[in-house]
Amino acid sequence: MSTPLRKSPGSRPGSRPAAAGPTALPRRLAELRGPDVPPRPLDARALAALAANPGCRRRALLDGAGVDKAALARALGAPAAFGQSQFAIARGNAFEARAKADGGTELVRLLHAALPEEDAGRPPEAVDTPDLSAAGPEGRTARTALALREATAAGRWALLDHPLLALTVAGTPAYLEPDAVVVHPDGSWTVVEIKSFALIDGAADAAKAGAAARQAAVYVLALEAVAERLPGPAPEDGRVRHQALLVCPKDFSNLPAAALLDLRKQRATTKRQLGRLTRVEEIAAALPPGASFAPDRPAAELTAAVEAVDAAYAPDCLAACELAFHCRDRARAAGDVRHLGRNVRSGLGGLTTIEEALAAAQGDHTSDGAADPAVAALRRAAALRAEALAAAAPAEGAGGCR
Amino acid sequence: MSLITSLARLEALRAGRARPLATVRHRHLADRPLVLVPLTTAGETGAPLGALVGTDRDAPRLLTVPQPRDRALRFAFLAELAEAVLPYVEEYADVTVTEERKETDPATGRRTTVAAELCADAPQLLVPGPAAVEYVRLLGRSMRFRRTAEEDPAADWPAPPRVPLLGRWLTHFGERAHLPGSALLLSTTELLSRHWATGQSHLEDQHLGALLAWIDPPEGSTGPEAARRAELARDADGLLLHPPAGPATDPAFDNKLLAPAIARYDQARTAVLETGRGHAALRAADTTIRTLLLSQLRPTWDAVWRGVDLLRALPEGASVADRWKRDRWSYTGHRDRLRAGEPPQPRRDDAVTAARKLAARETAQARLDAQEALDDPLVMAGRRLAGEAFAGEVAEVVMAHSEAKVPRPRPLVTVRTDDAPLLEEGARVHRVLADGRSQPAEFVAAGPAGLTVRLTGGMGRGKVPDEGTVPAPGDRVCWTLFEHAPRGGPELPEPEHTPWTHGGPPGGGAEEPDPVTSEDLL
């Protein structure tokens, strides 16, 4: 599957010669998106979110087809609450520009300082910054691959500013743009993530650093695909280093500070999860003919199309998926216990709906529920809870066990 | 999450409003707490945007930063915040009572009783959510290493007086908030979700408006409807009707209203600096920003106070005063460190301090778990379900004695119960006596009549057990497998006696202030 989904700007969907085989899928996906709707590129953030919930076929299909989920959610009447403040964007851009100032030497110096001495190589004096501009995403990925090959052969420090990498996910290619990739003199590569949250006393917010690590892991996987095609033997520990450099503002200033992020776990998890994703063409083939996610379709038709693909909603989706409010509404309407959280769900055994669980708790199950340990535990919990609430009803301050 | 909590969530879904998770209030709530609702600038760490602060729900004090990237304006905000917070924090410092406490004499190593000063009450800070607790810590960190002009006359950017002091207090409050059961700095969402279960996930409970909607839905509405409105309802301009509780603002608010207002302020200020005229326009621009920020802060301010009302309606748990006393000790201790002129809390704890903190938190967690269960039958129900306690009616009491030279009473008590505790023979169990003491016993056997335990103490010194220390058949008793007053592990040695392998001396010197960048703007 090497036919890219995202075409260079200006090329319209379906402008390629229509043939059976590999091009059938892009055409089908373009139909799903709707005519004249440009595909949204899959970025590392979306891939990381997808890897966090690999059971969600709905997300896999919509992301794979490049559907604009935010527009779709608006059309469904459950708009996402995402958005970014222009203050944050301005700050992020200003900080990245500052961190990459002076031709990247400062950035490479930060990396050199963060590495253990025996691994750091010689200190950077001059840093190569190859030109990566080219037309279209295919051109840019090819240019990036060429620049990586040349920089690796040169045996000097090199900084690739915003390279473009391709990664095949669930049968469709995704283009990824890391903030930077550094080529070491020994020929190994390091992913650089520049973030605008602060590194205070050497520690960053755990949730944000974790998100950065998952993103960087996606870049590592994409770089590994490039490294495989490189001629010559790879270095002993692999071409792509499994540690990314996280560059953040130091304390409350705008000076860059850096720390190494270990990505081995995130890389392994993401690789496994992305490999497990059902191939997009299989999901697309299961759709009823004529189904489409074009935002200009009537809401009822869109709802039917979205419902035709299974979702695996969990409350975590609210922070990661534009369609989450829609899925949440459906899960609530269906009485699915999963919308209360994974921990609630896991305590209830085979009981998957609210009605089932409440009926089991009340003991008015006609079937012999007591044999099911989950039902027995739930009944016991209900009895204990009712007893405690009844004991507290006269409300005398001190509890019943004192 | 225990099954009993999950069940409460299911019940809440069916009822359409929150269901109780506790029958008493498990945290101290001051008569006059200081409520602080902070807002921060998106993308700028520690660049406050505004705050509402005060002890009077009808008259909050509004503090704003018209251009958050300007250091001078940020310092002005922090100075004003110090003016608003420090008098409240310090007014408890001078009213003290004398308490006896046990201390280890460093010379002899014996435990002796000494009289110590304890503040009669302590300040309490209330913020909307856990993110605001973190923000209080962050503000504390950003201020405590600053130097005032008095401390360092050569400083390029001296901090206003009292700002470093506020930083040290906020750091103390933020640190203390990590201790389970402490109440010096509390987040309203955590308080409310400790006491009520809603029909939504724990993640969604972080939204103060939605949480309140479940607990106390407005007339004619149900919890889920009201919560959905609180979460998502937007006006015609796409702005949230219920602004987020902060400290982060709604991006739509930032982009549509705040950014143009700040741009107008910048313009007006440039005009004033260049021409010396246009003060009225500058004031107008400042007022606009204040009005905008107030519109975002006030709903959260009111929500925090509504939460306070709901929590006050619950009777206080019996052990809450004990935990609050520990908070008072903590407050008194920090007051003493400040008076002794000790340097600010370090950037990172050394190994000894970190070990002590972790041990203290573990002990506090165990104590909190035990106390909450004893105070509240609903919490105890969860422990019984988990097999950590059992309750029932006494079926039979058989008098028995130990085989020592002087036989001691060791009565066997059989309890009829449906609970299934995880007991092994000889396991120690505990119960509360009428006078509040804890009575130990050991598990003997499970029989057809119930579970039999042998009382091993708490019956006085005589041959015959004291009145009321042995239950009679028909009494209801509740035995726990956990101790009622758990102690931490063995005491750690003093820092100077800790070997260097464990992070003992030599200690580092005093911390340097944060370096100041030459740029005026962040």
Image: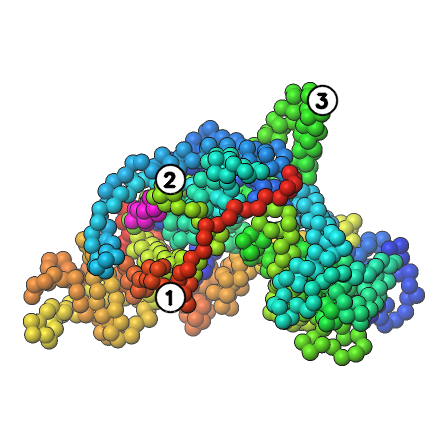
Q: Secondary structure at mark 3?
A: helix
Q: Position of residue B176 (x, y in %)?
A: 41, 49
Q: Position of residue A15 (x, y in %)?
A: 91, 60
Q: Main secondary structure of the magenta part?
A: helix
Q: Secondary structure at mark 2?
A: loop
Label 1 Cα crowd, 10 Å radius (few <14 / some 14-19 / many 20+): few
Q: Chain of mark 3?
A: B
- Residue placed under numbered mark 3 in the picture: B275
**B224 or B153: nearer the viewer:** B153
- Residue placed under numbered mark 1 in the picture: B499
- Residue placed under numbered mark 2 in the picture: B123
Dots 1 and 2: beta carbons under 8 Å? no
Q: Is residue B198 visible?
A: no
**A268 or B398: nearer the viewer:** A268
Of pointers 1 and 3, the one earlier in the residue sequence: 3
Of pointers 2 and 3, the one earlier in the residue sequence: 2
**B340 or A6: nearer the viewer:** B340
Label 2 Cα crowd, 10 Å radius (few <14 / some 14-19 / many 20+): many
- Name which residue type carries label 1: Pro
Q: Which residues are magenta?
A: B321-335
Q: Chain of mark 2?
A: B
> CA separation, marks 1 and 2?
38 Å
**B151 or B117: nearer the viewer:** B151
- Name which residue type carries label 2: Pro
Give me the residue at 69% from left, 78% from top: A236
- Name which residue type carries label 3: Thr
Q: Are marks 2 and 3 on the same chain?
A: yes
